[in-house]
Image: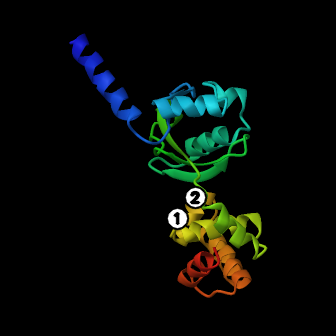
Amino acid sequence: MADKAVRREDALRSAFDRLNVPMILCDEHQILMPLNVRGQALFELESLSGDLLTARPSHPLSRLIEEVNRMQADENVRRMITFPSGKRYIVESSARSAKGPKRWLVLLIQPQRSISVDAQTVMARWSLTERESDVAKLIVRGLSNREIGAEIGVSPETVKTHVRAVFEKSGTHSRAEFVAEVFRTR
């Protein structure tokens, strides 16, 4: 029986290791541990430790986990956060259990992909604020206001305000027109 359990655990770890996204577990003691090789690489790259929540409570990942623990059961969180290294990540958590923080939480952490330097240069010509530039890049990626809000941690109404500013500064009137303008001037 123990042999079968070991084989299942090895198969599960192998499956996790084949995923292209870092996976981190927050256990019932609020200790973080990587679940796959990409998670381990992220731990090393970002100098994360198992006791992050107690050792560095102001770390953006610690704050996100605390937020999840305060939420209603079965609510997922997906946010873009900036680590102290300056790198941005999209973090998606499993929903909090009805039993609260005494249950495990799984975090998927994806590095934020940026659009090409040429497109960034194009957007810079419109004097966008940093947040407007973030929104503009996500418009180019085809995200809706709701999806953009989830990625950067603001409401869809706030996103709508940023989208209007992007359109006004770029002299465009729609997402399609804006994306065409970005790629036309590359």
Identify which residue, 154 or 19, lies in the foreground: 19
- Image height of 43 relative to 164, above or below: above
The residue under label 1 is 147
x and y, in percent, of residue 118 in the image = 66, 66
Circle 2: element type = helix
- Image height of 8 relative to 172, above or below: above
Which image quadrant is residue 168 in?
Answer: bottom right
Circle 1: element type = helix
- Image height of 27 relative to 20, above or below: above
Please tell me which residue is depicted at 50% across the width and 34% down the height of the picture: 38
Q: Are marks 2 and 1 in contact (CB under 8 Å)?
A: yes
Circle 1: residue type: Glu
Circle 2: residue type: Glu
Please tell me which residue is depicted at 66% across the width and 61% down the height of the picture: 117
Mark 2 burial class by Cα count in 10 Å: few <14, some 14-19, many 20+: many
x and y, in percent, of residue 81 in the image = 65, 49
Label 2 to label 1: alpha-carbon separation: 6 Å
Query: Which label belongs to residue 151?
Result: 2
Residue most extreme to the top: 2
Which image quadrant is residue 165 in?
Answer: bottom right
Mark 1 burial class by Cα count in 10 Å: few <14, some 14-19, many 20+: some
x and y, in percent, of residue 90 in the image = 57, 50
Query: Which label belongs to residue 38?
Result: none
Judge from the rendering whether residue 143 lies leftward or rightward of residue 88; answer left or right.
left
Residue 127 visible in image:
yes
